[in-house]
């Protein structure tokens, strides 16, 4: 969490906290730690209650709704039945995106003369004769 802070920045933050809270700083730190401890205990109690009610072992990470449904309510067959119709749509979409990507590459290569020369030289077995590079338009020519 504090990986990107160096010692000077941490010192400035501590000095700022001391100036803001003054003599109450130890009490504020104690109250903050007590709150974190209480939240952790509440989460532990909630997972214990859910484990007892459902009859399965539930971890804190399982409380995310998607993970909870996937792990505890759906069987493997149910999950496959839900994914099957969407898998075809995903495959079709991926093929379309790949096709558009290839078409964009072809258009970019046809617009860029240097890429077309590189592509032709890569496909030819004999080396292409060296040609002079095309002159680039300068700022003076445009104005």
Image (tube, rainbow, N blue to C red):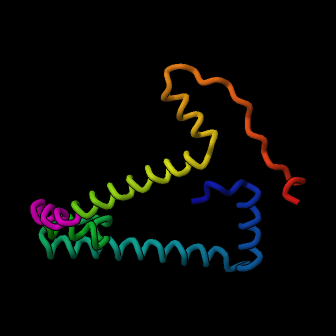
Residues 47 and 29: in front is 47
Residues 26 and 82: in front is 82
57 inside magenta stretch? no
Q: In the orientation shown, which residue stands out farthest toward the top?
A: 126
Does 26 sit left or right of 134 as displayed? Answer: left
Relative height, residue 62 to residue 126 (above, below): below
Name the image quarter holding residue 69: bottom left
Does 15 sit left or right of 28 as displayed? Answer: right
Does 29 sit left or right of 63 as displayed? Answer: right
Where residue 55 sits in the image (x, y, percent)? 12, 69
At horizontal 16% and vertical 73% (from top left) the residue drawn is 52
Image quadrant holding the N terminus, namely bottom right
Name the image quarter holding residue 5: bottom right
Most frequent secondary structure within the magenta stretch: helix
Where residue 25 sits in the image (x, y, percent)? 67, 75
Residues 124 and 64: in front is 124
Relative height, residue 81 to residue 106 (above, below): below
Q: How many marks overall? A: 0
Residues shaded magenta? 75-86
At horizontal 75% and vertical 72% (from top left) the residue drawn is 16
Relative height, residue 139 to residue 59 (above, below): above
At horizontal 41% and vertical 75% (from top left) the residue drawn is 39
Relative height, residue 48 to residue 3 (above, below): below
Image quadrant holding the C terminus, namely bottom right
At horizontal 39% and vertical 71% (from top left) the residue drawn is 40
Residues 35 and 3: in front is 3
Where residue 36 sits in the image (x, y, percent)? 47, 73
Does 65 sit left or right of 120 as displayed? Answer: left
76 inside magenta stretch? yes
């Amino acid at each position: 969490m504090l990986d990107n802070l160096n010692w000077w920045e941490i010192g400035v933050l501590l000095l700022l906290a001391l100036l803001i809270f003054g003599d109450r700083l130890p009490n504020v730190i104690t109250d903050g730690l007590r709150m974190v401890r209480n939240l952790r205990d509440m989460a532990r109690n909630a997972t214990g209650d859910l484990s007892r009610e459902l009859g399965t072992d539930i971890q804190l990470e399982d409380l995310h709704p998607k993970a909870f449904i996937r792990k505890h309510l759906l069987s493997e067959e149910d999950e496959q039945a839900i994914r099957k119709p969407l898998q075809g749509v995903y495959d079709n979409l991926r093929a379309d995106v790949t096709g558009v990507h290839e078409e964009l590459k072809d258009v970019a290569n046809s617009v860029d003369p240097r890429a077309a020369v590189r592509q032709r030289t890569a496909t030819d077995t004999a080396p292409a004769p060296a040609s002079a590079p095309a002159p680039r338009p300068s700022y003076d020519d445009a104005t």
